[in-house]
């Protein structure tokens, strides 16, 4: 199976970004994530257990937060916790 990737990016206000993240959280809780970017659209079905990575960075001129969620939809028992929360 080929890898399909949709990437959303750009500049938006903090309220718009927060609204988008809240919408993704609602979809995650419901068990279905939909994402469309350009000509690519996909529906994802998160497993019960997710591999979660949250990374914060801070420099004099820039700050950032990267959130990564991944899972194996066919083998949820293979998920493990890593890092400290």
Image (tube, grey):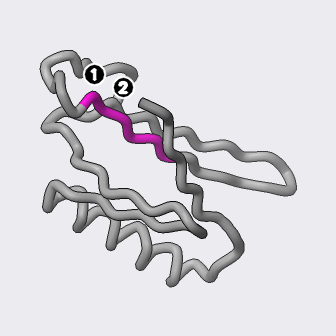
In this rendering, would 59 be left or right of 23? right
Q: Give the residue displayed 59% in from the left and 43% down from the top.
A: 56
Whole-percent x, y for residue 66 in the image: 56, 46
Q: Give the residue displayed 44% in from the left and 63% down from the top.
A: 41
Quarter occupied by residue 49: top left
| Residue assigned mark 1 | 81
- Residue 11 or 62: which is nearer the viewer? 11
Q: Is residue 31 above or below residue 47?
A: below
Q: Within 10 angstroms of label 2, few (less than 14), some, or many (20 or more) residues?
A: few
Most common secondary structure along the magenta stretch: strand
Q: How many marks?
A: 2
In this rendering, would 79 be left or right of 64? left
In the image, residue 71 lies in the stretch drawn in magenta: yes
Quarter occupied by residue 13: bottom right
**Cα–Cα gap, marks 1 and 2:** 9 Å
Looking at the figure, which quarter contains the N terminus? top left
In the image, residue 75 lies in the stretch drawn in magenta: no
In this rendering, would 57 be left or right of 69? right
| Residue assigned mark 2 | 84
Q: Give the residue displayed 21% in from the left and 58% down from the top.
A: 32
Q: Is residue 27 above or below residue 18?
A: above
- The segment highlighted magenta reads 67-72
Helix, strand or loop at mark 1: loop
Helix, strand or loop at mark 2: loop
Looking at the figure, which quarter contains the C terminus? top left
Whole-percent x, y for residue 81 in the image: 28, 21
- Residue 48 or 65: which is nearer the viewer? 48
Whole-percent x, y for residue 31 in the image: 16, 55
- Residue 52 or 6: which is nearer the viewer? 6
Whole-percent x, y for residue 22 in the image: 34, 71
Q: Is residue 26 above or below residue 54?
A: below
Q: Is residue 11 above or below residue 57?
A: below
């Amino acid at each position: 199976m080929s890898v399909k990737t949709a990437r959303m990016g750009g500049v938006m206000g903090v309220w718009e970004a927060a609204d988008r993240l809240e919408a993704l959280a609602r979809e995650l809780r419901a068990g279905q994530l939909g994402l469309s970017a350009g000509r690519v659209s996909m529906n994802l079905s998160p497993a019960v257990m997710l591999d979660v990575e949250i990374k914060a960075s801070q420099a004099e001129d820039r700050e950032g937060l990267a959130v990564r969620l991944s899972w194996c939809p066919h083998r949820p028992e293979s998920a493990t916790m890593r890092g400290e929360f």
